[in-house]
Image: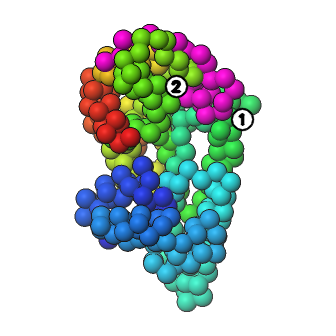
């Protein structure tokens, strides 16, 4: 039973991954928590809680060593601290290897799974796949402004393959239950529905926006499949897109209006220079064929619009 440490174990993606691993009966799972209340929730869900500063490389390395962790999964969405997390994982792997080599013992490499995302592609004009270069002169477009640094970090992870078994997963816009990423678009519609207003609802996006979409449960099974195969069964290029469909934003929000009972019309006012809104206005042109063929990924939630009222109700209940 391999030991898996999920950084961001109480988060939207991290918690879903932890539950998927536990339900299989094949893994023991640790998860990081920022406070005692969140740690308690992990313990209730049979996840071993860790309360410590995981952005300190020395502390993270010691956590990995002390708990005999086999695979580390970074779902934190850390920005400035992402390099520190990777440094801590590499330090643990190096320390373990050097200690065992002194005794003439060969051991498996530490696994590391990183959560990237579909914004690294920008808005490519042509259809592409996860073999395409990102953040380079050969890329079709530039990464979204909030994550312009991420292709460099992906390369740092790939460069660590001498010390680690790695996988990089790129979930696109993740929905289901809380669906936090939809709040930018859904909050103004929900307010209009509550007030009964028929005034224009202003959405900070472009009409050309076309998000790639994936349910959080399918994200969890994608990570689960990668973790199952982290020991050298991911091929030469361990990067995988996770998405099930793309939808033009106007069609998506028109359907949301119906689900919420909104009578007002929508006005798309553009991102207004906000980097996060700009990223939400990107147009996905990707598919997940390699995740299906290499990981055996079999997503189940593949029709967002058909089940949209359920997802809207779940989001509203979480607010």
- The chief SS type of the magenta part is loop
Q: Position of residue 303 (x, y in %)?
A: 30, 26
In the figure, is residue 6 to the left or right of 87?
left
**Label 1 SS:** loop
Q: Residue 136 shows which numbered tag?
A: 1
Alpha-carbon neighbours of circle 2 within 10 Å: few (<14), some, or many (≥20)? many
Q: Residue 221 shows which numbered tag?
A: none
> Between residues 47 and 296, which one lies in front from this camera angle?
47
Residue sitting at the far bottom:
103
Against 45, is 133 above or below? above
Query: Is residue 209 a member of the stretch shown in magenta?
Result: no
Query: Is residue 272 a member of the stretch shown in magenta?
Result: yes
In which quadrant of the rendered view does residue 319 lie?
Answer: top left
Q: Quadrant of the N terminus?
A: bottom left
Task: Look at the image and tell me whether residue 255 can be seen.
Answer: no
Q: Position of residue 85 (x, y in %)?
A: 61, 62
Q: Position of residue 264 (x, y in %)?
A: 41, 11
* Residue topped by disc 2: 284
Alpha-carbon neighbours of circle 1 within 10 Å: few (<14), some, or many (≥20)? few
Against 95, is 113 above or below? above
Residue sitting at the far front:
195
Numbered range of the magenta stretch: 261-284
Residue at figure coordinates x 38%, y 55% from the top left: 15
- Structural distance between the alpha carbons of marks 1 and 2: 18 Å
In the figure, is residue 20 to the left or right of 226?
left
In which quadrant of the rendered view does residue 6 lie?
Answer: bottom left
Residue at figure coordinates x 65%, y 38% from the top left: 146
Q: Position of residue 246 (x, y in %)?
A: 43, 24
Residue sitting at the far right:
137
In the figure, is residue 235 to the left or right of 270?
left
Would you say the residues marked 1 and 2 are in contact, meaning their CB atoms lie under 8 Å apart? no
**Label 2 SS:** loop
């Amino acid at each position: 039973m391999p030991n898996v440490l999920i950084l961001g174990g109480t988060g939207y993606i991290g918690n879903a991954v932890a539950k998927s691993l536990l339900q299989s009966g094949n893994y023991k799972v640790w998860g990081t928590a920022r406070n005692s209340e969140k740690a308690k929730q992990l313990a209730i869900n049979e996840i071993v809680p860790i309360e410590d500063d995981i952005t300190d490389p020395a502390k993270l390395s010691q956590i990995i060593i002390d708990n005999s962790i086999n695979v580390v999964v970074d779902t934190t969405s850390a920005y400035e601290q992402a390099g520190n997390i990777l440094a801590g994982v590499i330090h643990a792997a190096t320390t373990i290897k050097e200690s065992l080599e002194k005794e003439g013992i060969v051991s498996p490499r530490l696994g590391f799974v990183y959560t990237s995302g579909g914004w690294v592609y920008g808005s490519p004009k042509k259809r592409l796949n996860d073999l395409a270069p990102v953040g380079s002169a050969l890329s079709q477009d530039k990464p979204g402004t909030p994550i312009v640094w991420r292709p460099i970090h992906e390369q740092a992870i790939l460069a660590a393959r001498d010390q680690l078994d790695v996988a990089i997963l790129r979930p696109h816009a993740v929905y289901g239950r809380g669906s936090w990423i939809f709040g930018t678009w859904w909050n103004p519609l929900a307010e209009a529905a509550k007030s009964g207003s028929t005034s224009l609802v202003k959405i900070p996006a472009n009409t050309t926006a076309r998000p790639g979409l994936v349910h959080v449960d399918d994200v969890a099974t994608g990570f689960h499949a990668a973790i199952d195969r982290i020991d050298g069964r991911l091929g030469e290029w361990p990067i995988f897109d996770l998405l099930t469909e793309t939808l033009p934003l106007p069609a998506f929000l028109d359907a949301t209006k119906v689900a919420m009972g909104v009578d007002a019309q929508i006005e798309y006012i553009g991102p207004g220079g906000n980097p996060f809104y700009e990223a939400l206005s990107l147009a996905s042109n990707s598919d997940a064929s390699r995740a299906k063929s290499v990981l055996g990924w079999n997503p189940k939630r593949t029709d967002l619009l058909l089940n949209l009222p359920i997802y809207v109700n779940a989001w509203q209940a979480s607010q």
